[in-house]
Amino acid sequence: MSETVSRSAWIPGVLVATAFAFAARELAALEFFHDTLHFGDLLLVILLGMLWRMVLPLPRWAIPGIDMAKKPILRWAVAALGLRLSLNEILEIGGPALWVVSVSTIVAVFGGWWICKWLGIPERMGLLLGVGGAVCGASAIVAADTVVQAEKKDSALAISVITLLGTIGILIYPELGQFFGMSDFDYGVWAGASLHETAQVVAAGDSISVEAKEVATVVKLVRICWLAPIVFYLGWSLRHQHAAAGQAKVSLVPWFLVMFVIFAALNSLEWLPTEGTFSVSNLKSGGSWLMTIGMAGVGLQTSVKDLVHAGMRPVLAGFLQWVLLAAVSVGMIRLVM
């Protein structure tokens, strides 16, 4: 009997996380959050979870399921990002744009890590901020955390910083694009190469034109392609160079990144069904739901007190990395396009 109970102990907590995900998606669809504040469901579900923690303690019966949401469910969601990648779409934007996003992403990763070290931010927090700001925000932080194995508050803080900066970017990028005199195509490349979350990239591109939105989305997908090799490198680096973080026994090749590559290959080869229960669109929708449920787990395990105690240095680090990424990508656009 006790074995049966233990096996099903995760169900209540997952249901709680799912309820938070549903609420966040409903709120994100409202005009105020979607069009005025540009808040996506991932940000909202984290905020809802944090608000819960401010008012009420986390019930013990919910903890196993919330842990499951924050770990295996969220990792499957990251793997499902591969379903968004298509080699044909990536090649259509051209070689120069690929150079822009690739070079700026690599510079931002290592530059972000250096900035965090320079500001005296703890190593594991700095590693998460660097990957999240350079690649794809919350999803990249979740992926990197599997090898970094930071404290719970570190990943939540990193996600909060990256989401805050990206939200500001939605508001200022259209104005900056006009200030720099960018064409719609160049602006799309810049937004895709330097904004954080996919939803933020789409929103910033849509503020200019349909072409800018489409280009920005594809360029953003190219950045997501860098997720697997960067996390692979991070795992190797922690094992061989970073003694403090490398004490943890981590897998050099996380299983969900292997699935990420497999899903991307299947989608590029068009081997997935286009209709039926397991169609590409349904799988993408399922992955999006898993991501929101997983982020609910992150929010519900995040204490506002811990974030306040972290101070302003993580925000400054994220901002400086963002400036570096935006500047390098603009410079590359001027140079090669």
Image: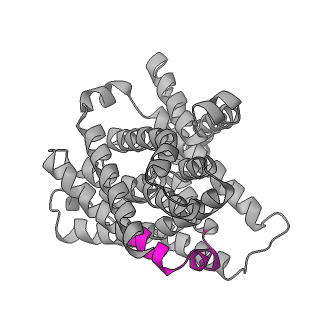
How is the rendered protein coloured? one colour
Camera-side residue of 46 and 222? 222
> Can you say whether 88 is above or below 185 in the image?
below
Q: Residue at x 46, y 56 (%)?
A: 136
- 102 relative position to 175: left or right: left
Q: Residue at x 46, y 77 (%)?
A: 96
- 29 relative position to 179: left or right: right
The location of residue 181, given as percent across then percent down, is 48, 55
Q: Residue at x 20, y 60 (%)?
A: 247
The location of residue 167, given as percent across then percent down, is 48, 40
> Can you say whether 234 is above or below 29 in the image?
below
Q: Residue at x 58, y 59 (%)?
A: 184
Q: Can residue 21 be seen by looking at this rendering?
A: yes
The location of residue 175, given as percent across then percent down, is 49, 43
Camera-side residue of 239 and 226? 226
Q: Can residue 149 be seen by looking at this rendering?
A: no
Q: From the image, which quarter does the C terminus lie in?
A: bottom left
Instruction: Give the magenta part as a residue range.
Output: 85-102
> Can you say whether 332 is above or below 294 in the image?
below
Q: Would residue 98 be counted in the magenta stretch? A: yes
Q: From the image, which quarter does the N terminus lie in?
A: top right
Q: Main SS type for the magenta part?
A: helix
Camera-side residue of 175 and 157? 175
